Image (spheres, rainbow, N blue to C red):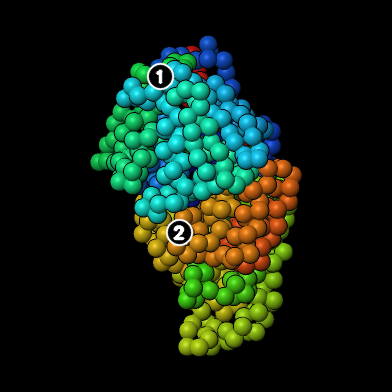
Amino acid sequence: MRIRSLGTRFAIPCVAVGLILSGCSSGSDVTPGTASIGSTNDINAHDVADLRDGGNLRLVLSSFPESFNFLQIDGGTESTADVIEPMLPSPFTSNAAGELAINHDYFTDIELTGTDPQQVTYTINPQAVWTDGTPITWEDLRSQAAALSGRDPGFLVSSTSGFERVEKVERGVDDRQAVVTFAKPYAEWQGQFSPLYPKATTESVAAFNDRDRDGLAVSAGPFQLSDIDRSQNRITLSRNPSWWGATPKLDTITFSVLDSSAWLPAIQNNELDIAYMSGIENVTAAKQAPGVVLRRTPEPSWSHITFNGAPGSLLEDPQLRIAISKAIDRQSIVNASQNGVVDDPKPLNNHIYMQGQKGYQDNSAPISFDPAAAAQMLDDLGWKLNGDVREKDGRRLELRDVMYQQDGWVQTAQIVQQNLAAVGVKLIIQTVPGSGLFKDVIDPGNFELAQFSWGGSVLPLGALPQIYAYDPDNLQGNKARIGSPELNALIERTMSELDPVKAMELANQADQMIFAEGYSIPLQQASGTYAVRENLANYGAFGLASADYTKVGFLK
């Protein structure tokens, strides 16, 4: 489960989005919602005076964090993001419309103080301290910028987050001010240092890769890590006694790792306070549970099928990937998964922007569903039918499709399997436990197709260099191993454009190129439907907004 916020700016791979497929919506009293991101959210907003002091917020994780360093490649997942969000600084917050505001708990001012060269000045809240009592200073920002710059490949980063463009980070008027100077402009500078880790975590390769692998050594949020129980698959946060901001209403936050099939029973049995729901049967059953309400706001998370196009792989040829894409009926998949939950479900037709988000346009023409054209392309590429499966140069067109071990993903794969069989392509479905899907299978490239989701934020452009730029020596988030110098150059132009309108135009040009090379097949945007305890306030379906954990709690 991922409740999106600005606190995790760059895209993260999500293994479970609750894609429980459903045949129909008859007998349901659930009103379908929109599939587009709007300007509202659904969090049961209340003044903190309406909340009781204390309480434990019970949340769910799909897998145990491989590392608590979200900046490190093993930690750049939704599970890590969920756990660290109440514990680490982020420069900006976002409202329901995706509008940014300075997070004054951590910074008194953040200002773009120059454009030639680009320069950003961060003034740190003088009260801000790490849980070990060390002040948050400009050196924390300098150290993180250096670690994420990509200059030292020993730092196994999830994303450079634009820091490869930073020339230097200097001390400002005092230790509480950092001046960041860019060698090249960076469009989404507002997403940097989100989250911010202490210098002790980022100052060396050894610390960066391993210091926070088994827990978060130091934090600086309203909550801190108080217990990790691996035998029970449970992580507990408690109030941070060093916290200088508004006192949280909650005493604790508990994360439990549960298989997605257990989320609905846990809601029904009052073992969780919130869990993601989709598929009309699950949504209806959750709504009927005592003391539970549905809260819904579309969010910037989306599911897809990614190809492995590495050199020498079976799917190295982009035209072969396009042919396979055209054989897959995306509308049928989306209908099956969102029927009754979303009004007029539609496939997502953009890799960068979500439906309803400024900048969204349909760039999916190269992979439009056309099985006859797909079969003709396969013939023209030399993949000839031999019985039920096509062959070329002694190789059979048999593809392994890997995914999280969840019924919804398997059911999606079964639709794909039927579609591809109709054009002579054999699909082998392979499920993997969530904790090993990326580290053991996808990241090493042991697949032909992979099904998972990307979770994004109000700053979508950062996904371009992270996911779609190609550097064979530093793949980072490019799970597909697909790209080109031309796409890299266009991504570079997009990320250097400080005019938001021009950057949007360039981003869509890049998306058209991503579709044309058959990088991946977008399926659907998450509906953002959550089953929530009716007495839980200021928490729920956030959409584009970020959470304020000092205001989350239970009604009196």
| Image height of 291 relative to 474, above or below | above
Residue at the disc numbered 2: 474
User: Based on the displayed image, in which of its 4 quarters is residue 510 positioned?
Assistant: bottom right
Total labels drawn: 2
* Relative horizontal placement of residue 221, taking residue 365 as reference (left or right): left
The residue under the point 48% across, 33% down is: 170
Front position in the image: 92 or 319: 92
Q: Mark 1–mark 2 contact, CB under 8 Å?
A: no
| First-in-chain label (1 vs 2) | 1
Say what amino acid the circle numbered 1 marks: Trp
* Relative horizontal placement of residue 356, taking residue 195 as reference (left or right): right
Residue at the disc numbered 1: 243
Camera-side mark, 1 or 2: 2
Dot 2 falls on a residue whose secondary structure is loop
Residue 463, percent from left and from top: 57, 50
Dot 1 falls on a residue whose secondary structure is loop
* Relative horizontal placement of residue 385, taking residue 350 as reference (left or right): left
10 Å crowding of disc 2: few (<14), some (14-19), many (20+): few
The residue under the point 58% across, 39% down is: 189
The residue under the point 57% across, 18% down is: 46
Front position in the image: 44 or 192: 192
> Which residue is at the far left?
231
The image's mark for residue 543 is none
| Image height of 167 relative to 315, above or below | above
Front position in the image: 226 or 268: 226
10 Å crowding of disc 1: few (<14), some (14-19), many (20+): many
